[in-house]
Amino acid sequence: MATACKSDKADSIEMRQLRVLHGTVAELPIEELTGVGAQRGKVLREAGIETIADLLLRLPRRYLDRSRVVAIKAAPVGEEVTLLVRVVKPGQAPRFRRGGRQPPRETIVEDESGTLRCVWFRGGHYHKFEIGDQLAVSGHLEDYRNQRQISHPEYEFITTAEDEPESPLDLLHTGGIIPLYASSVELQERGLRSRGFRRLVRAALARVEASVTASVDQIRAAEHSLPPIFTALQHVHFPPSKEQAESGRRRLALEELYQLQREIARRRRQRRAQPASPIVASERHVPALLASLEFELTVAQKTAIAEISADLERVEPMRRLLHGDVGSGKTLVALCAALQAMEAGLQVAVMAPTEILADQHFYTWQRLLAPLGFGPVLLKGGRRAAVRRELLTGLQSGGLPLVVGTHALLQEDVVFSRLGLVVVDEQHRFGVAQREQLTQKSAHAHTLVMTATPIPRSLALSLYGDLEVSVLDELPPGRLPVRTALRTPDRRERIFAFVAEQVAAGRQTYVVYPTIEESEESELLSAETAYDELSKGALSGLRVELIHGRLSTEEKRSTMARFAAGETDVLIATTVIEVGVDVANATVMVIEHAERFGLAQLHQLRGRVGRGTEAGYCILVAYPLEGEGQLWRQRLEALCATNDGFELARTDLDLRGPGQLLGTRQAGLPELRIAHLLRDEDLLETARAAAWQDEGE
Ligand code: ADP
Ligand code: MG
């Protein structure tokens, strides 16, 4: 991992769940339900089910329409299929062998028409099955030596060997559509059989009946053709049709989004209660800075600068998110805000998530501010004690107006005399608690947070609802889109020949690897290994350097400085260079093991090239493992198809399903478990209107 400074512990305080269902019965402890004794209660609680409501909110992960299920023999090879099967040979439980290769694990299943081999290679999640377990398995059907097989199938337990056969009553209730619960696998291992789970859900529904109450008025729900809350619960668990299951889920999603918006509205009110120092608009320094630039601001930059300036003039503390794709020019916008504060005699703190990025901000800000008579100081880990003490004294006395740093800024002995503005760059790399900690160093500071994580605007507005949002939806003119290509490892020779050509033309290249060094357990090509290989082989004669998170602060700084100065041709790196690094002469980004990276991360990495006026190239080299599924390919192909971060964000949300990672977690809000940010986008406005009305905003 790169030096992200996420504090999971601090975050988890905020990760409590939203209370979606209300009502005296629903809120009863789970043990109150008939059929749940002390022992079963313990199992359920360990799986996070503490109340009757918690049980009802464990929604099926998906549904299986019995009428669409095919027989093994009739299933088309080469396609995605779902099969209802019975385990005949469970196979060996996996044994962990250090260093050595794992043999594939297999389980043989059958239906009336024939048998199927389910196989798991290294790293796949494998459950211990029993003969007689009934499963729904799905995946890509292959033909392996005349035997039908699915590698790494998705599977769910329908019933297990120990259950009695399904009673006609159960089937009646599911109406041919079988709800499949993700949680049943996990609970299964703890002794709660899947069918028992369904029975509990039925008992819970009968128990709560009319006593569950909705927070969002049914009139609003009906505008989206959604049923009342209790009907929704019934339809979700025992669906008469797939459509009704989905509108049931959406009705619950509406409640969940409502609770989220309530939370946001509450926070906003709290924040407004504490006034900030109003900062008058800059008359000297901002105009002087802008006049000194050799380029024109984009319209989006001008708008953002004006919005921020107006915020700063108010007594209400600013909490603004500056949201702009990589390379959209956020730094300059932040500089203007900082100048406004400094001109008014206030101090400014700028926090970046990595040392490399902090260094870079320090140099950029120094260069642009020196002509105006301001200079930043740099505070990060590993500075000499005497230097650090001097810095702290300067900040405390107010003699130093501007500090750039890493999370070292958060330490308790960093005290300001009149901190007026806090800027947090690449805020998604920080935990929420850390972000707030810096602002709390002054009772009156305004905050500007910046991110390149692309989230569709409507979602940003809702998720970051207690922040104002400025968007840089425009890149500086003259930027050419980065040309992106997906390649297999057998093309590496040609790829590095191309790198050498670019170097001969005076350009520079990054080559990125997922790990620093070779390890026993992994077969990944690492940065160190590749450095040895390439600097002696394909790139010999070029000036090649290596950078990663394990180098000392000083080594990292000097390596980056040499690259920025053009003294290095090729920088072999880990993701320490992922965010913010800005070297305009670098035109090629080679990402090895691209299949290992997430879409947002790849987009960030690609953003390191094509920052000047020369065309940029991003070459993705993928080393997929057998049986790993196709999601990685979809991600990489999406990246090749567009340079638009917002479009990629939508794809990412789509591929990841609920996509919580990108959304609420980052905003420091409880996770959404029912609502799907894309599919339920239309419900956000309704939820927001209802919540803000109830909160009296
Ligand atoms: P990011 O939004 O990714 O943080 P930066 O602020 O690092 O982007 O800006 C990327 C590059 O674009 C920098 O080299 C910066 O000097 C340059 N730049 C910023 N604004 C403009 C503009 N309006 N026209 C041309 N170049 C610009
Ligand atoms: Mg930046």
Image: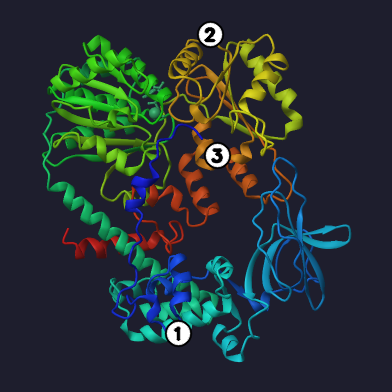
- Circle 2: is it few (<14), some (14-19), or many (20+) Cα within 10 Å? some
Q: Is residue 613 visible?
A: yes
Disc nearest the viewer among 1 and 3: 1
- Does residue 507 lie above or below 346 as drawn? above
- On the question of residue 608 being in view, the answer is no
Residue annotated with mark 3: 642
Quarter occupied by the C terminus: bottom left
Which residue does the image show at 22% across and 34% down from the upper left?
Answer: 308
**Cα distance in 3D space between marks 1 and 2:** 71 Å
In what element is the residue under mark 3? loop
Amino acid type of the residue tagged 3 in the rendering: Thr
Q: In percent of the image, x 49 and y 34: which residue is there?
A: 604
As drawn, the label of residue 348 is none
Q: Which residue is mark 2?
A: 567
* Place of residue 467 in the rendered image (x, y in percent of width and height, measured from the top left): 26, 45
Q: Is residue 307 above or below residue 286?
A: below
At mark 1, the secondary structure is helix
In the rendered image of this protein, does residue 586 appear above or below residue 406?
A: above
Instruction: Look at 22% across and 12% down and name the residue there.
Output: 372
The quadrant holding residue 212 is bottom left
Q: Which residue is mark 1?
A: 203
In the picture shown, does residue 485 fall above or below 107? above
